[in-house]
Image: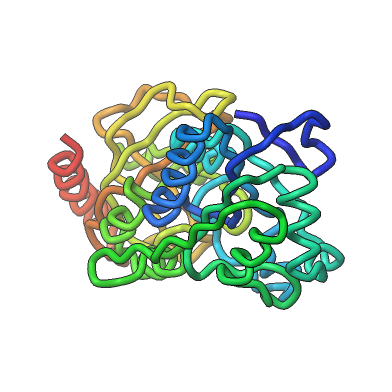
Amino acid sequence: MYRWYGLGDVPAGWGQSVVTIGEFDGVHRGHQRIVARAAQLGRERHLPVVVITFDPHPDEVIRPGSHPPFLCSARRRAELLASLGAEALCVLPFTLEFSRLDPDEFVRTVLVERMHAVAVVEGEDFRFGHKAAGDVQLLAKLGEKYDFTTEGLPLLVAEGATVSSTSIRQLLAAGDVSGAAKLLGRPHRVEGVVVRGHQRGRALGFPTANLEMPPHTAVPADGVYAGWLASLDTDGRDVQRWPAAISIGTNPTFGEGEQTVEAYALDRDDLDLYGVHAAIDFTARLRGTLRFDSAAALVEQMCHDVAEARKLTR
């Protein structure tokens, strides 16, 4: 996949393309349908598919302090988009100046002059231009002016609700990782570097990998989960993968502290992952966070949690 940061990175000789624009945070099932349709058009017309997205998140520029939690890393997003058929990803630096482009300027500057778009595919709720003045209907009119076609796909509905990044974040905030997985089309993943914690898990017989994650990562609600722990290579691909019991919380049994996200690879006490880039995939929530009267009571519960995690990750 070609990766461009800013319009200046687009090769001068870049030809015609099929384009879709959006944040694509999480690359959930609704996003997947949009990119798949763009890829279908690309195959029919023998043209590459370009996905255009933004950095930082537009909300953070327009309303500072409102940055939503990320459902996946930028690298993971690119990997997922490539797997759907996107051949280029253009990340546009989102600034106040850029946000002030009116819809016609945006289309001419981005879609026409740089991407040479012949077809644009969006969700029916797509908005663009200064103060989100542009919608799919206006995009279609501008397409007639600049000679490209526009498709606005109906929003995907699953489990009785519209599939959206917002709804997935809400499910994760409630600890419903299985519900989030249904909308994502795969388990929710968090990534980070394994760092040294208090090493209480090792002392209790359950050594854990403690992840230090980038800011704004969408972390599920405090609790204990079943899932998978994976070590990643420099390109973000899984190297090794283990079924895991995962704990998110402030370790109330030992006094309140900072929130940690740590995973115990089932039946493995020989792993040395410090400094490794790793990922945790969440399969199911086992329970909420509890405070125990003793370390022995905690170990007893942890044995039960591990047994349940083993059942769910066979």
Q: Position of residue 121 (x, y in %)?
A: 52, 53
Question: Quick check: 269 left or right of 39?
Answer: left
Residue at point 67%, 37% (across, down): 16
Image quarter (top left, top right, bottom left or bottom right) of the C terminus: top left
Q: Position of residue 134 (x, y in %)?
A: 66, 72
Question: Quick check: 111 left or right of 199?
Answer: right
| Residue 114 in view in this figure | yes
Image quarter (top left, top right, bottom left or bottom right) of the N terminus: top right
Q: Nearer the viewer, residue 224 or 84?
A: 84
Q: Position of residue 279 (x, y in %)?
A: 45, 38
Q: Position of residue 135 (x, y in %)?
A: 60, 71
Question: Quick check: 81 left or right of 207?
Answer: right
Task: Tell how many labels.
Answer: 0
| Residue 221 in view in this figure | no
Residue at point 49%, 44% (across, down): 38
Colouring used for the render: rainbow
Q: Nearer the viewer, residue 44 or 260?
A: 44
Q: Nearer the viewer, residue 168 or 197?
A: 168
Residue at point 33%, 59% (across, down): 180
Residue at point 28%, 55% (across, down): 182
